[in-house]
Amino acid sequence: MRLSSLSNVLIAFMICTGGLAGARETAPLPQASPQSVGLSAERLERMAGHFEQQSAAAAAAGYVLMVARDGRLVFSRAIGHRDMERQVPMSLDTRFRIASMTKPVTAVAVLMLIEEGRIQLDDPVARYLPEFANSRVYTGTDAQGNLLTEPAKRNISIRDLLTHASGLGYARFFDTQSPLGKAYGALPLDAHDSLAEVVRRIAGVPLYFHPGEGWRYSYAYDVLGRLVEAVSGTPFAQFLNQRLFMPLKMTSTGFSLPASELPLLATVYRHAAAGGLEPSKAMLGDPTDVARWPSGGGGLISTAGDYLRFAQMLANGGSLEGRQYLSPVTVSLMTQDQVPEDALFKYWGSNSLGLGYGLGVAMQMDVRHAPYLGFVGDYAWGGALDTHWLVSPKTGLVAVLLTQIDPSGNKEPQRTDTDFRDLLFAAVTAGRGID
């Protein structure tokens, strides 16, 4: 290679990764230039430019973006601000509330226990959490508005929880109108209750349908967090820290963060009625409060780099840097469709057409109806505050895009995930999966 060509490659590499100086100490994965793995540096810059425009237009205050291919980090960029009022710029080490991106982490914890023979997928949850022994199913209301119920045809299984087929519901956002939705919304889930107490209260509310006979987003993963600690004998947060976060070097991930790291936490914004962004008043809680119950459905705080390592571990078939967390067989099961083909479409609507759901992740099943670029088998699960990640097994791509937008102020659905995927796959120039 001529010196001028080599220089061009190095310059492109420094642009895409933010420079080489000090980067090797903090990069979440080994680094490479985009061209060396069949990606266009120019088109990755175009993706960053798009989100710079989004930030300037107040779609979000800022973003952190990371892209890897074949296990090597090829692009990272911090865009905009993590605190607009104080004019604090976004940085690669910014902490984010990742909301439902917690669910795949919880799923991995459950699957670890299955691999150890402590539980089985189709075990009844009541075997380990007796409060689910006599679940009842909602059938309507009487003249006084009291909930009417009937006994569940069978017990909720661990698989039901992992696939959102348990019949459990969720508070807020998901059903605020029906009598049963209001019952879930009225649950007195105090921030300082134990996880055991929280799950006992959830178990006391009727199910929307008989276990296995429907699909509904729910508190299932909070129940699974309690299952992990009941079976392992270790508090859920401690289990994740010992078995996943510390070995995976996810040192900035947990259910709370030290007070010294509070300045690194991105502010959550919402779209104001008059235009622009305003800090969200959603009840997000004190992020430094270590006594809050650990929500396996949405409680984690993390960074783009930490989550990239978690996603890369899954992309590698359950291993990273010589350590095996799950068997490739288990990861394959996790990322295969486990629900009826129209389950997500019936629940979420047209933007989920062609998507399936495995054990903690959704996967692309039908590219004919996909709203974005990609391949059958791509899998992910985002968070309500507009946080996203993706593993594309066919192409070897792993990517994370994080921002913090409370959706309650949105006048129309966010396009972030579709833009993210379209721009990411548009940067592919060569390599496995497209030849």
Image: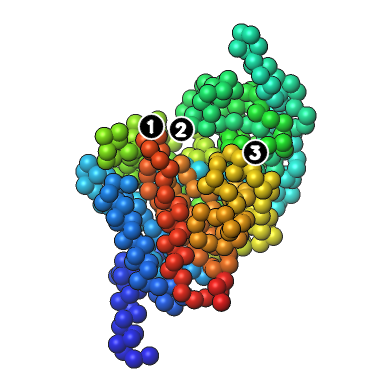
Residue displayed at 59% across by 51% down: 355
Above or below 28: residue 356: above
Label 3, residues with CA under 10 Å away: few <14, some 14-19, many ≥20: many
In whole angstroms, how far apart are the C-alphas of marks 1 and 2? 19 Å
Residue 400: x %, y % from top left: 44, 56
Label 1, residues with CA under 10 Å away: few <14, some 14-19, many ≥20: few
Q: Are marks 3 and 1 in contact (CB under 8 Å)?
A: no
Name the front one of labels 3 and 1. 3
Q: Which residue is mark 1?
A: 282
Label 1 sits on what residue type?
Answer: Ala
Residue displayed at 42% across by 49% down: 415
Above or below 83: residue 151: above
Query: In the current view of this chain or complex, which residue is farthest to the right?
Result: 153
Residue displayed at 38% across by 58% down: 65
Query: In the current view of this chain or complex, which residue is farthest to the left?
Result: 86
Q: Is residue 330 left or right of residue 258?
A: right
Residue 225: x %, y % from top left: 59, 39
Q: Which residue is mark 2?
A: 291
Which mark sits nearer the N-terminus, 3 or 2?
Answer: 3
Which mark sits nearer the N-terminus, 1 or 2?
Answer: 1
In whole angstroms, how far apart are the C-alphas of marks 3 and 2? 32 Å
Q: Which residue is mark 3?
A: 215
Query: In the current view of this chain or complex, which residue is farthest to the bottom?
Result: 2
Residue 38 vs residue 253, the one in the foreground: 38
Label 2, residues with CA under 10 Å away: few <14, some 14-19, many ≥20: few
